[in-house]
Amino acid sequence: MNIEQLQEEWDKDCQINDNFLGEQSTATPKLHAKYIKLLVGVKLKHTKYSADYNMLRKNKFRYYRGELGRDELTALGWVQWQGVKPLKNEMDEFLTGDNELNTMKVKIEYLETMIYFLESILSQIKARDWQIKTHVEWKKFLAGM
């Protein structure tokens, strides 16, 4: 599920029907289960991508220093680095400009955005019963009770 689909799903799920407040209240645990499951899945994916990024960064570091053997290069699908071996203070510049590392970093930041959004949804779900209770109290007030 991408973030646009998640936003559309939450747009539907966040609605509270004034005519069925009891049913809306009992739906809260189902909503919580749905979004906590999504959050756990995204967090696990984030953990995997972060580990993959760290391994890729280590391999790129060794690649630019010319430390990878022929078998490792073949396994990674890379050709031998033909440029000048970077100095220690230049290595960050090489790694920062690497396309594969940047692609992986964008994926990780996308997942972090999804995690933030899902955590925000869950905080709204936690407040949902209070919102429904307040809405019931308001209806009672308007009815003169």
Image: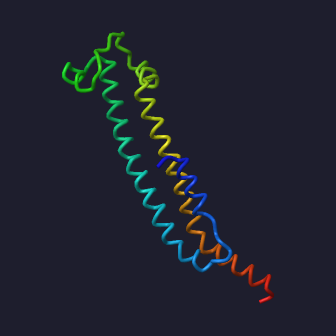
Quarter residue 89 falls in: top left
Residue located at (35% from left, 36% from top): 54
Q: How many marks?
A: 0
Q: Look at the picture and state if 34 lies above or below 93.
A: below
Q: Is residue 88 left or right of residue 72?
A: right
Residue 108 x, y percent position in the rendering? 45, 40
Nearer-the-camera pick, 6 or 113: 6
In the image, residue 119 above or below residue 16: above
Is 8 on the left-hand or right-hand side of 51? right
Q: What percent of the width, then of the height, locates residue 100?
A: 40, 27
Quarter of the picture containing the C terminus is bottom right
Query: In this view, which residue lies farthest toward the front?
Result: 19
Residue at position x 53%, y 47% in the image? 3
| Residue 142, x across and y down, in percent | 80, 82
Q: Quadrant of residue 140?
A: bottom right
Residue furthest out toward the bottom: 145
Q: Quadrant of residue 121?
A: bottom right
User: Depth check: 67 or 39 in front?
Assistant: 39
What residue is shown at x 79% (from left), y 85% (from top)? Answer: 143
> Residue at the spot x=29%, y=16% of the render?
79
| Left or right, 92 with reference to 120 | left
